[in-house]
Amino acid sequence: MRYSGTVSFEYVIENYLNLKNGTLATEDQVGLDESDYRYTPITLVVVGRASFMSGKFSGLPENCFPDESDLELESLRNAGSGCDWRDAITTSERKSIMNLIQEQCMEEALDDYYDPDDKWDEPDSSRDYDYGDF
């Protein structure tokens, strides 16, 4: 398998604003006392790229090579203010975003490879070959 591409999508971080001190908290941190918090989702615009090329593991040693892959978060900006958020997200949010970048690049490659609108089974009338011509 082989793919390479750049994707752009929106990612929503679900946060709760503490009405008393103005800090943000996750759903796990809010606990039972939700009256002091207001749901405040943050929408981020993600731009990333991913590539992968399968290695070759059989045959002559000089013709073999390992899998090669690259995954990069190029831009992570707040959709409202445009501020850079690459250093403001948690490790689990970064991991989730990186997985989404890889999945979407892979899906684009598969979509390009298989197009159900292609009509390979229908004969092309412009090709009127006589088998004796070959």
Image: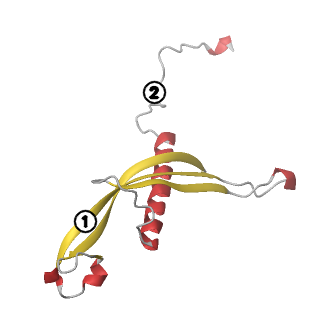
- Residue 94 coordinates in the image, percent (x, y): 45, 66
Q: Could you give the CA–CA distance between mark 2 and mark 1, rounded to whole angstroms?
A: 50 Å
Which residue is at the front of the view, 116 or 43?
43
* For residue 15, side relative to residue 122 (left or right): left
Q: Which mark is residue 41?
A: 1
Q: Is residue 28 above or below residue 53?
A: below
* For residue 84, side relative to residue 36 (left or right): right
Which residue is at the front of the view, 19 or 129?
19
The quarter of the rendered structure image containing the C terminus is top right
Q: Please name the residue shown 57% across and 48% down the image.
A: 3
**Which residue matches tag 2?**
122
* For residue 66, side relative to residue 131 (left or right): right
**Which secondary structure lies at badge 1?**
strand
Q: Please name the residue shown 60% across and 55% down the image.
A: 70
**Dots 2 and 1: beta carbons under 8 Å?**
no
Q: Check disc 2: other Cα within 10 Å, few if <14, some if 14-19, many if 20+.
A: few
Which residue is at the front of the view, 56 or 132?
56
- Residue farthest to the left? 35
Q: Please name the residue shown 37% across and 51% down the image.
A: 9
**Which secondary structure lies at badge 2?**
loop
Is label 2 or label 1 in front?
Answer: 1
Which residue is at the front of the view, 3 or 12?
12
Q: Earlier in the sequence, mark 2 or mark 1?
A: 1
Q: Check disc 1: other Cα within 10 Å, few if <14, some if 14-19, many if 20+.
A: few
